């Protein structure tokens, strides 16, 4: 944000001059007052230290230059919407990827395996914003879908609480984001689960379990799948922020009021503290996601718990 010459006040001067016809030099006293009020006249390291101090001591993420209100008020509603979509797509996407990976591995080189592979490669190589553009074309010009560019229809915008009708209206608006995000989120997990399970199925202890006369289902779901899930669970720790970023791309194209459009408008307006707060939250979610992945892995595998206890 600061590598590009100029700041928010410079942009304000240029816009005001173009709109009112005033000379930029005549706006300089007002610009100096704005820099003083927002602290933009301080060196960059000082601005950063002041921002971090306010976060640690008082939970103050700064002021939005554009909206002239606290950053937390600007991003609060959009953050919860983004988080809700990200959690749903993470759970459904990873679950679908695991199931498709198991199906593909147990039907290796058959039609089902080929279709699952095609599904996975499509989700990996096709950018999400391209899928969103294609879907937007069909929604707007082919199907004439009325639920575009909002979370709710106008009659539900001011309704307090959540009813069944309002929830259904929400699904009618956000299903394009869910479909594209789940496809993209499940694609890599499908490939990973398939490869892991094929490796595990050739392990010596799996052959021993078969030799003991265990059924195919017990061998698969009691011994093979739990061990094949280890890399998938560790990968999920780093997928939560990826789900948010993927949702952001789609929301920008579809005009859904989540963090995506806010990021674009804030970058355009050089609203520095809004962007910094969003990136800080995404980084925090990455740390939390990895912590949760470690906890789930310890619950799944007693060897991890024993190693953790033994290591102190």
Image (spheres, rainbow, N blue to C red):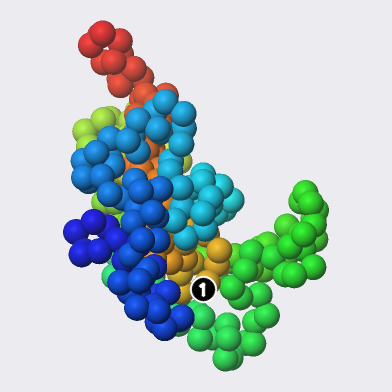
Q: Name, please, the residue furthest toward the bottom.
A: 141
- Relative to 245, say whether 124 is above or below: below
Residue 263's quadrant in the figure?
A: bottom left
Task: Name the residue rendered at 59%, 65% in the picture.
Answer: 174
- Relative to 278, say whether 131 is above or below: below
Task: Name the residue rendered at 61%, 75% in the picture.
Answer: 148
Of 24 and 209, nearer the camera is 24
Q: Can residue 98 be seen in this view?
A: no
Q: Where is residue 311 in the image (x, y as percent from the top left)?
A: 23, 11
Of 156 and 267, nearer the camera is 267
Q: How many labels does the image show?
A: 1
Identify the image quadrant of the N terminus.
Answer: bottom left
In what element is the residue under mark 1?
helix
Residue 200's quadrant in the figure?
A: top left
Q: Residues within 10 Å of mark 1 (few under 14, many from 20)?
A: many
Task: Name the residue rendered at 44%, 56% in the picture.
Answer: 65
Horizontal side of residue 17 vs 6, given as left or right: right
Identify the image quadrant of the C terminus.
Answer: top left
Q: Position of residue 251 (x, y in %)?
A: 49, 66
Q: Is residue 238 visible?
A: yes
Task: Name the residue rendered at 21%, 64% in the picture.
Answer: 4
Q: Position of residue 85 (x, y in %)?
A: 54, 54
Q: Position of residue 285 (x, y in %)?
A: 40, 40
- Relative to 239, say whether 177 is above or below: below
- Residue at label 1? 254
């Amino acid at each position: 944000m600061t590598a590009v010459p100029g700041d928010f006040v410079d942009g304000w001067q240029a816009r005001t001059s173009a709109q009112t016809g005033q000379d930029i030099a005549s706006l300089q006293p007002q610009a100096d007052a704005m820099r003083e009020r927002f602290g933009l006249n301080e060196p960059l390291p000082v601005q950063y230290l002041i921002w971090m101090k306010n976060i640690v001591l008082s939970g103050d993420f700064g002021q939005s230059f554009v909206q002239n209100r606290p950053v937390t008020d600007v991003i609060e509603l959009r953050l919860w919407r983004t988080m809700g979509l990200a959690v749903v797509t993470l759970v459904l996407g990873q679950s679908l990827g695991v199931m498709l990976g198991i199906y593909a591995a147990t039907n290796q080189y058959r039609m089902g395996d080929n279709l699952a592979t095609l599904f996975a490669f499509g989700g990996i190589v096709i950018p999400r914003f391209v899928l969103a553009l294609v879907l937007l074309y069909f929604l707007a010009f082919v199907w004439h879908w009325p639920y575009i560019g909002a979370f709710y229809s106008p009659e539900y915008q001011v309704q307090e609480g959540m009813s069944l009708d309002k929830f259904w209206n929400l699904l009618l608006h956000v299903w394009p984001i869910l479909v594209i995000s789940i496809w993209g989120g499940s694609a890599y997990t499908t490939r990973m689960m398939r490869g892991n399970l094929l490796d595990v199925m050739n392990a010596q202890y799996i052959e021993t379990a078969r030799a003991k006369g265990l059924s195919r289902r017990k061998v698969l779901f009691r011994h093979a799948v739990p061990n094949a899930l280890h890399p998938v669970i560790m990968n999920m720790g780093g997928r939560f922020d990826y789900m948010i970023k993927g949702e952001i791309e789609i929301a920008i194209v579809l005009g859904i009021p989540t963090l995506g459009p806010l990021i674009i408008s804030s970058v355009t307006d050089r609203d520095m503290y809004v962007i910094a707060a969003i990136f800080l939250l995404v980084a925090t979610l990455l740390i939390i996601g990895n912590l949760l992945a470690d906890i789930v892995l310890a619950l799944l595998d007693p060897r991890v718990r024993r190693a953790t206890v033994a290591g102190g």
